[in-house]
Structure formats: C-alpha cells, structure tokens
Image (spheres, rainbow, N blue to C red):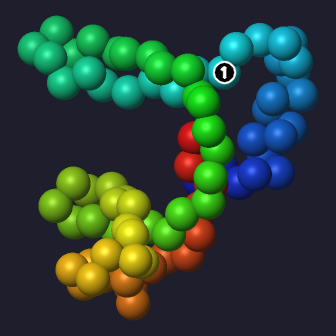
C-alpha cells in the first residue's frame, strides 16, 4: 500500500516534532550502502510509471521533449 499525506501526518505525530527528517536511498555502491540525506524541500510533481526502472519517474510538463506527460499518474508529494 502506498502512503498518503494523511498517513504520513499520522506517522509523524508519533515522533519528536523537533527531530530532523531525512530520506534514505541505496547509494549504488558494491556494498549496497544505505545513504541518508536531509529533506530540505517538499513539493508536488507529476509522475509516470517507468518500466525501465520498475518504479515511477518524475516528469517535467514544461519540457518540450517530454513524451509521457499524457500518462501521468497525477500529482504526488515529493521530499
């Protein structure tokens, strides 16, 4: 199940409101290190399903070369 903004708010209520917020990702090295970076900005963007990466890809509606804008799954909140 994918998390919604409402679910995220409920989860965040369980934590110290002054705790820093980071996001984690696979760094891509041979050790599969999990890296962490602070969240500096939250924004709303459109995404499309991306078969190549087996995930979603952020699209830029203002990019004239963007070919998948009509297939956008809708706006999502990105951190």
In-front residue for pair 41/26: 41
Query: Based on the displayed image, in which of its 4 quarters is residue 75 positioned?
Result: bottom right
Q: Position of residue 71 (x, y in %)?
A: 38, 85
Query: The C terminus is located in which quarter?
Result: top right
Task: Count how many numbered circles sit on residues in the image.
Answer: 1
- The residue that appears at 16% across and 61% down in the rendered structure is 52
- The residue that appears at 49% across and 76% down in the rendered structure is 73
Up-down relation of residue 42 to residue 25 (above or below): below
Up-down relation of residue 68 to residue 29 (above or below): below
Work out which residue is located at the far bottom of the displayed protein and give it: 70
Residue 50 shows in this picture: yes
The residue carrying mark 1 is 21
Up-down relation of residue 43 to residue 41 (above or below): below
Q: Secondary structure at mark 1?
A: loop
In-front residue for pair 42/47: 42
Is 50 left, or right, of 19 in this rendering? left
Query: Based on the displayed image, in which of its 4 quarters is residue 18 positioned?
Result: top right
- The residue that appears at 66% across and 21% down in the rendered structure is 21
- The residue that appears at 60% across and 30% down in the rendered structure is 40
Is 58 left, or right, of 21 in this rendering? left
Query: Based on the displayed image, in which of its 4 quarters is residue 44 positioned?
Result: bottom right
Q: Position of residue 32 (x, y in %)?
A: 22, 16
Is 32 left, or right, of 36 in this rendering? left
């Amino acid at each position: 199940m994918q998390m919604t903004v409402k679910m995220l708010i409920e989860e965040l209520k369980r934590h110290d409101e002054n705790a820093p917020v980071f996001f984690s990702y696979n760094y891509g090295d041979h050790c599969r290190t999990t890296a962490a970076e602070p969240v500096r900005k939250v924004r709303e963007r459109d995404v499309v399903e991306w078969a190549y990466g087996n995930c979603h890809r952020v699209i830029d509606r203002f990019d004239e070369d963007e070919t998948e804008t009509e297939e956008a799954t809708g706006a999502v909140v990105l951190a």
